[in-house]
Image: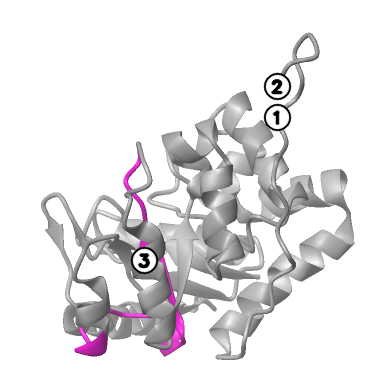
Amino acid sequence: MIDIHSHILPSLDDGANSIQQAIEMAKQAQAQGIYAMAATPHHMNGSFTNVKEDIEQYIKELNQVLNEHSIDLNIVAGQEVRLYGEIVDDYKKGDILTINHSRYVLVELPSDHVPAYTAKIFYDLQLAGVKPIIAHPERNREIAANTNKLYELVEQGALAQLTASSLTGRFGKNIKKLSEQLIDHQLVHFLASDTHNTTSRPNDLQAAYQTMEKTFGMDTVYYIQENAETLLYGDTVYAEPPSRIKKKKFLGIF
C-alpha cells in the first residue's frame, strides 16, 4: 500500500514530536503493508512554516534512520498546503512541494468553510500544470452540510483524499456515513492515513481498506489503491465522473 498523506517528519508540525515517535509510526505503517509514504507536513498553518528545502533534507535524514533500523518504508516528499491567495505564484516560483515531485499537490481547506476563491485558484493551478488534491473534505463543515460544494470542485477537475480514520469510524458516525457517500458518488479518489502519531491519530489505512472492501467490494479498493500508485510513479490519475449526493425527502419535501 501507498500512503499519500502523513505527518511523520519529527518536530516540524503537530505530527511526530521526536525521531523515536517517527520510527514507531514507520513501524506501524510497515506492519500494515505500507511500503511508501508521503511526508506532508503543514506548509503554513498557525505557528508552523515548513519550506521545501527543509522538508527534503528531513526526509533524506529520516530515510537514512529507517534504513539503519531495517524498516522497509520509503518516505517521499510532499506538503499539506493550506489554501491561500498566492499559492499559484509560489508554485511557479518552485516554493511548493508536490507529492513525490509529481503534478499533484495536497491542498487543505479551512475546517469550517470553502473559500469563495477556491474554484478560481484550483483552475489557475491546473492551468499551471498541477492538479489539486483536496485533503480530508469529509471533515470540512461546509462540505458536510452541502456536498455540492465538493461536487463542483471535483467536476471542474480537482481530486480529493479521504482520511482512513473517517471511514473506520474513529471520527464518529456522521463522518463515517458521509465518507461512504463520497466514495459511492466518486467524490474521493485517494485514501490516506493523515497519521500524526501511533495513538490518538494512528495509521488506520489497512483497516479502512478492509471497511471499504466490505461495503463497496474489491473493485473500489483496487481503483483507490491504483490511484495512489499512479500518482506516486508520476502518471496521470484518471478519475471516474462524479455524481451529486441527493438529499433524502422528508414528508415528500427536499
Residue with the mark numbered 1 = 247
Q: Are marks 1 and 2 in contact (CB under 8 Å)?
A: yes
Q: Are marks 3 and 1 in contact (CB under 8 Å)?
A: no
At 85% from the left edge and 50% from the top edge, which residue is drawn? 216
**Crowd rating for badge 1 (residues with CA inside 10 Å; few <14, some 14–19, many 20+):** few
- Secondary structure, mark 3, is helix
**What's the amino acid at mark 3?**
Lys
**Crowd rating for badge 2 (residues with CA inside 10 Å; few <14, some 14–19, many 20+):** few
Q: CA distance from mark 1 to mark 2?
A: 7 Å
Q: Is residue 46 left or right of residue 226?
A: left
Q: Quadrant of residue 120?
A: bottom left
Residues in magenta?
92-111
Residue with the mark numbered 2 = 254
At 55% from the left edge and 91% from the top edge, which residue is drawn? 234
Q: Earlier in the sequence, mark 1 or mark 2?
A: 1
- Secondary structure, mark 1, is loop
Residue with the mark numbered 3 = 120
Furthest toward the top, the residue is 251
Question: Where is residue 123 drawn, in percent x and y?
Answer: 42, 73
**What's the amino acid at mark 2?**
Phe
Q: Quadrant of the N terminus?
A: bottom right
**What's the amino acid at mark 1?**
Lys
In depth, the one of 251 and 40 nearer the eye is 251
Question: Where is residue 189 drawn, in percent x and y?
Answer: 64, 63
